[in-house]
Image (cartoon, grey):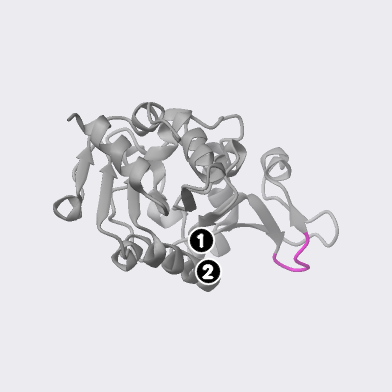
């Protein structure tokens, strides 16, 4: 039996699938990842991306933060790929109970997924730090320099989790609950090197873990099945029945 046939069997037999994904899920849509050879961490900026995407930097050098953020993080023209679409299809069929994602691009929702737990927030939610007025991603993209509130003039902050900030407690609780109840965990497009997000998979209560990632991860030894092919290419071939 081939790896794809094995994965299809696992999906067929599963009653409660949870998908845990990272940047690699969206690279096939044209969204840059972070840690690959051509990812953001290997590009030349005045400061390392880890520094720019920190709370301290956002507060202290807001203009430089937004120069990087608007160019590299606000990818508003990208579309869901085969992986996003198949996961939405699995959810609609009652097979998949939750998508737990480290991505902030909103592509899972654009593909039709409903129960998406965004560990690191979303570029599509932005709030004035002073009056809490909501702004969409296009407003942020159109801002000439630092996005300011059109009601009170306050600085707007994306609802994304920066370095030095904590993950949302309710999102973590929902993710843990979904993982504990799942019988199949599919992990895709993540190095499993970013904590505390990566630590969540220890709460998985089922017996089968499938890893879809082009590079090795610290959890390969725990996986029931490891596939090194592009996620969209793999999931796009799966049948929902």
Q: Residue at x 52, y 66 (%)?
A: 171
Using the rendered view, name the quadrant where residue 216 is placed.
top left
Q: Position of residue 160 (x, y in %)?
A: 55, 57
How far, Cα to Cα, is label 1 from label 2? 9 Å
Residue tagged by mark 2? 168
Viewer-side residue, 115 vs 147: 115
- Name of the residue lying farthest toward the left: 221
Disc 1 to disc 2: CB gap under 8 Å: yes
Residue occupied by mark 1: 161
Q: Nearer the viewer, residue 230 or 166?
A: 230
Q: Position of residue 74 (x, y in %)?
A: 57, 40
**Relative horizontal placement of residue 208, taking residue 18 as reference (left or right):** left
Q: Mark 1 vs mark 2: which is more N-terminal?
A: 1
Magenta segment range?
129-133
Few, some or many C-alpha atoms within 10 Å of disc 2 (few <14, some 14-19, many ≥20)?
few
Q: Could you say whether the residue bearing mark 2 is in a helix, strand or loop?
A: loop
Which label sits in the foreground, 1 or 2? 2
User: What secondary structure prevails in the magenta region?
Assistant: loop
- In the image, taking residue 62 as reference, residue 45 lies left or right, namely left
Residue 109 drawn at (x, y percent): 59, 44
| Residue pictured at 27% horizontal, 46% vertical | 210
């Amino acid at each position: 039996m081939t790896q794809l046939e094995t994965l299809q069997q696992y999906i067929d037999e599963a009653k409660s699938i949870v998908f845990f994904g990272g940047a690699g899920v969206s690279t096939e849509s044209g969204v840059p990842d972070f840690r690959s050879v051509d990812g953001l961490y290997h590009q030349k900026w005045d400061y390392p991306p880890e520094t720019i995407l920190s709370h301290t930097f956002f507060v202290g050098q807001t203009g430089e933060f937004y120069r990087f953020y608007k160019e590299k993080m606000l990818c508003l023209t990208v579309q869901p790929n085969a992986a996003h679409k198949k996961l939405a299809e699995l959810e609609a069929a009652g097979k998949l109970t939750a998508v737990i994602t480290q991505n902030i691009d909103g592509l899972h929702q654009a593909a039709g997924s409903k129960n998406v737990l965004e560990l690191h927030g979303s570029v599509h939610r932005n709030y004035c730090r002073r009056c809490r007025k909501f702004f969409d991603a296009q407003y942020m993209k159109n801002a000439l320099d630092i996005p300011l509130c059109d009601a009170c003039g306050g600085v707007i902050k994306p609802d994304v989790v920066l370095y030095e900030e904590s993950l949302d407690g309710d999102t973590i609780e929902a993710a843990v609950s979904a993982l504990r109840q799942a019988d199949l965990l599919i992990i895709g497009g993540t190095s499993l090197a970013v904590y505390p997000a990566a630590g969540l998979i220890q709460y998985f209560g089922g017996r089968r873990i499938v890893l879809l990632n082009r590079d090795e991860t610290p959890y390969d030894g725990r996986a029931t099945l490891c596939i090194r092919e592009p996620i969209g290419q793999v999931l796009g071939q799966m049948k929902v029945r």
